[in-house]
Image: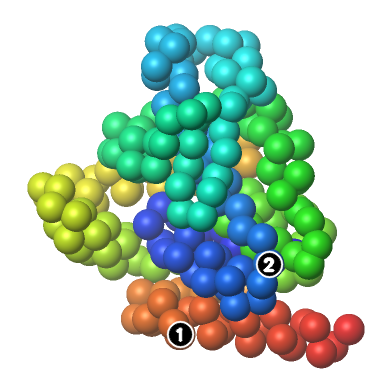
Amino acid sequence: MIAIDGPSASGKGTVAQAVAQALGWHYLDSGALYRLVALAALRARVDWTDARRLAGVASALDARFTSGDAWLGAERVTDAIRTEACSAAASQVAGVPEVRAALLARQRSFRQPPGLAAEGRDMGSVVFPDAGLKVFLTATVEARAERRYKQLIEKGIPANIQTLLRDLRERDARDAERPVAPLRQLPDAHLLDTTAMSVDEAVAKVLAWQGERASSR
Ligand code: C5P
């Protein structure tokens, strides 16, 4: 079990996915679950302050992942959950303890042989505290905004670097300062700062740590 936590747009999704693929393991994008809850709640017009109904949406979530795609029932929502509006909404619903509790068992069910690489904010602290390897993957907020900017422009989506910076800072603060499952580097997590690193280098580093662990057992 490898738990990779870190702030928005740090590249942890890309790295965790590549690590899972290299090891032939399963992969969990826990942020996608919060995004799916946000999308389902937006569509059902659930009031953001109604924790009970939000938890109901999370428990009843008809979500599925296929290679590279996310599904809400029969609808492919891969792009819909990645919009800036849905990102902001996901960060809101993720602050509701009842929603987090409702998603716990679902996240743990991804842990299947031969292994799981999971990424999010609380993989190492709450969902898989006994993970064999914990990584805190981060980069400066400027580097993260720059990467997000390039991704959006490549997809033909207009973007503004100042707006992206502001949104990332807001989301970082909300994720780090919330009372439930705040994002922080655990004492037993390896720090991986990817500001000046390529994806391949970051993946190689995580695989090297995993190799060290496997050989020391
Ligand atoms: O990782 P991603 O940016 O897709 O996550 C979307 C939102 O879900 C984040 O802003 C964060 O607030 C929340 N999240 C969380 N705990 C996780 C994963 C994501 O609170 N394990």
Q: Residue visible at 55% across and 66% down?
A: 16
Rendered-image quadrant of the N terminus: bottom right
Is 115 left or right of 155, judged from the image as shown?
Answer: right
Q: Nearer the viewer, mark 2 or mark 1?
A: 2
Q: Secondary structure at mark 1?
A: helix
Q: Amino acid at mark 1?
A: Glu
Q: Which mark is residue 25?
A: 2
**Cβ(mark 1) to ligand 1 < 8 Å?**
no
The image shows a total of numbered marks equal to 2
Kindly identify which residue carries mark 1.
201
Rendered-image quadrant of the C terminus: bottom right
Q: Which mark is residue 36?
A: none
**Cβ(mark 2) to ligand 1 < 8 Å?**
no
- Whether residue 145 is visible, yes or no, is no
Rendered image coloring scheme? rainbow
Q: Residue visible at 58% across and 71% down?
A: 21
Q: Quadrant of residue 146?
A: bottom left
34, above or below 7, in the image: above
In this view, the residue in front, 42 or 196, is 42
Residue 57, x across and y down, in percent: 57, 18
Q: Secondary structure at mark 2?
A: loop
Q: Amino acid at mark 2?
A: Trp
Distance between mark 2 and mark 1 Cα atoms:
19 Å
Residue 155, x across and y down, in percent: 19, 55
Q: Residue visible at 69% across and 27% down?
A: 102
61, above or below 66, in the image: above
